[in-house]
Image (cartoon, rainbow, N blue to C red):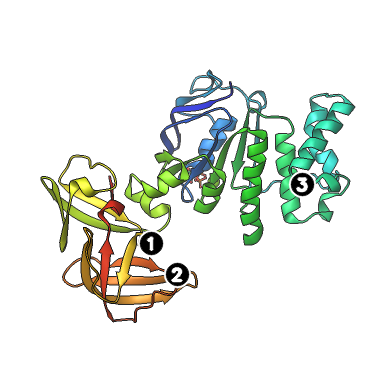
Amino acid sequence: MTGLALRGLGRRFGTVEAVKDVDLELKEGEFVSLLGPSGCGKTTTLRMIAGFIEPNAGTIELGGKVISSPSASLPPEKRGMSMIFQSYAIWPNMTVFENVAFGLKLRRLGREEIRRRVGEILDIVQLGDLADRYPAELSGGQQQRVALARAVVIRPAVLLLDEPLSNLDANLREEMRFEIRRMHDELKITTVYVTHDQSEAMVTSDRIAVMNKGRIEQVDPPVELYMRPRTRFVASFIGRTNFLEAKRERDVLVFDGFSVPVSALAIPLADGNAVTVSVRPHALDLSAQQPAANGRIVLEGKIARRAFLGDTWNYLFAPAGNGAALIVSAAPHKVIEDGAPAWLTIDPGQLVPIA
Ligand SMILES: Nc1ncnc2c1ncn2[C@@H]1O[C@H](COP(=O)(O)OP(=O)(O)O)[C@@H](O)[C@H]1O
Ligand SMILES: [Mg+2]
């Protein structure tokens, strides 16, 4: 059992609380990303898991055993983990094979076993034909695969990756996301992946922990996180969204210019009389003529701004009256002129109340 658990984990540097009260459990074989803006505490969390930084509060457990606490900490080399950094240095004077074999030689495995295990891993990362090349003879993506192979060949209990793709160019980065996930599907190593890039986290992860100012705000699978963000921060960090403010009057939410029965919302509403809901730009519908309501909300207004982005139109709809303008993304064929009257249709089931 190699599940990993962070419980009440905290770390401060002087007066900076880099990580606060972080709780996170990974099942054996699970791939979880720590996602958040620069400075939110991702690297500090990862380095505590690796054992390079000691926590000031809380514990880390691996397979049910405490490996880190403020009073005692297992050294990094005894944790059975591999870590890959942004600058994944591979040794320039060794071939691909030698780079990957290095950790196994240190562990004094037999020559045949080393050959077999390195061969297996090189096939998985699709470098089987390049075993005798030197790093200088490889592309950036191939070098990154060598770094991955070297990290996983020792069969770590946990694989830790800190923004491993940020030195690659955009196309390669996109391809490598899928590679990392494919490798995970084959090897099933418990993995913590640090990134500030939401697409990277969404492609690779079983679940994503969104961090803000040292805390985890929400942990959920990618689809859940996008469809049911629980905080304002999560809703705006994962994709784009609109926020609408409402006041609750018994069983009805009263917005500027319209109201919605509480029972029609996407998810149940917590108590309290001021409510913010999030609604995604593509969950809204625009028309140039007044549509039939059919149980939905129809607002009259005009196009305040628009931009053609190729795969979508991006409209800013300004409702008549005082209501806040909303961003709407529409299919390329849905053309409404700038400044023209328009009607916005809102399906109440797309309104997601957030904390
Ligand atoms: N060794 C350190 N000394 C002082 N402050 C640090 C140190 N490491 C990180 N910090 C601070 O802790 C916060 C979180 O940093 P970090 O974990 O590197 O964030 P992230 O990886 O999400 O960008 C930041 O405010 C950073 O400046
Ligand atoms: Mg970092």
Which residue, given by chain and number where applicable, does mark 3 sit on? 126
Identity, as a three-letter code, of the amino acid under mark 1: His
User: CA gap, disc 2 to disc 3?
Assistant: 36 Å
How many other residues sit within 10 Å of disc 2, few (<14), some (14-19) or many (≥20)? some
Query: Which quadrant of the rendered structure holds the N terminus?
Result: top right
Is tag 2's residue or tag 3's residue first in the polypeptide sequence?
3
Q: Position of residue 156 (x, y in %)?
A: 67, 29
- In the rendered image, which residue does mark 2 sit on? 312
Say what amino acid the circle numbered 3 marks. Gln
Q: For the residue labelled by badge 1, is the local secondary structure a helix, a strand or a loop?
A: helix
User: According to the image, label 1 marks what residue?
Assistant: 282
Measure the C-alpha gap from mark 1 to mark 3: 38 Å
Q: Is mark 3 within 8 Å of ligand 2?
A: no
Q: Is residue 87 left or right of residue 350?
A: right
Left of 13 or right of it: where is 101? right
Of residues 5 and 113, the one nearer the viewer is: 113
Residue at the spot 80% in from the left edge and 54% down from the top edge: 138
The secondary element bearing badge 2 is classed as loop
- In the rendered structure, the answer to whether residue 45 lies left or right of residue 114 reads left
Q: Nearer the viewer, mark 1 or mark 3?
A: 1
